[in-house]
Amino acid sequence: MTNHTGAVWAVATGVVDGRTVAVTGSDDDTVRVWDLTTGEQVGEPLIGHTDWVLAVATGVVDGRTVAVTGSDDQTVRVWDLTTREQVGEPLTGHTDWVRAVATGVMDGRPIAVTGSRDGTVRVWDLTTHRQTGPALTFPAPVKAVAVTPHNTHLTVAFGHDIATLSPH
């Protein structure tokens, strides 16, 4: 798996058409999909970001596996991994690098949670591609986000601290 022309900053795994894949993001501004059984790249790179891709997560929307990517270009993009096409317009609102992405389910709907160097965390409905609620603001750049397996808590790493939040 050596087709990136820059450093790989992010990786996530998922299942597409019954095969396990890895999705990688790089400072060559691309997202690539790899078949983990063969080690081969699947198709051409996913192109749309205009700067380093720093964060990748996978999830399921309407029965299809998607990748959600965050970039230094301040955007979040959603990719259908079956068609290998971008879904909708980029998700915008962050004013600095998007360094962290996680996926989960909230109130029965698939979501993406994104964190940025601008100190904000945003929650996106992956069905409507709209932000849900206001941005959460932290006193330092957000470096990582995670949603618990049962979607009961959101954990955010910012600066030298970690916070765990309950959506209820």
Image (cartoon, grey):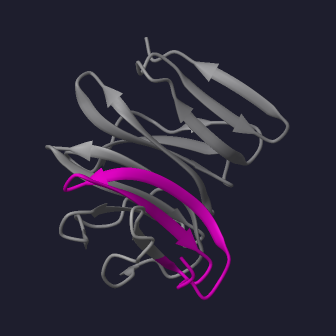
- Residue 11 on the magenta segment: yes
**Furthest-front residue in view?**
38
- Residue 83 on the magenta segment: no
Q: Is residue 52 above or below residue 149?
A: below
Magenta extent = 1-30
Q: Position of residue 137 (x, y in %)?
A: 62, 37
Q: Position of residue 14 (x, y in %)?
A: 37, 50
Compared across the picture, whether 140 is left or right of 167 comes to: right
Residue at x 22%, y 64% (from the top left corner): 88
Front residue of this view, candidates 52 and 167: 52
Compared across the picture, whether 68 is left or right of 80 comes to: right
Residue at x 45%, y 71% (from the top left corner): 39
**Furthest-top residue in view?**
168
Front residue of this view, candidates 5 and 51: 5
**Furthest-bottom residue in view?**
5
Q: Is residue 152 above or below residue 29?
A: above
Q: Is residue 56 visible?
A: no
Tell me the quarter of the image containing the C terminus.
Answer: top left
Compared across the picture, whether 25 is left or right of 91 comes to: right
Residue at x 63%, y 20% (from the top left corner): 164
Q: Position of residue 7 (x, y in %)?
A: 68, 77
Q: Position of residue 13 (x, y in %)?
A: 44, 52
Residue at x 35%, y 66% (from the top left corner): 90
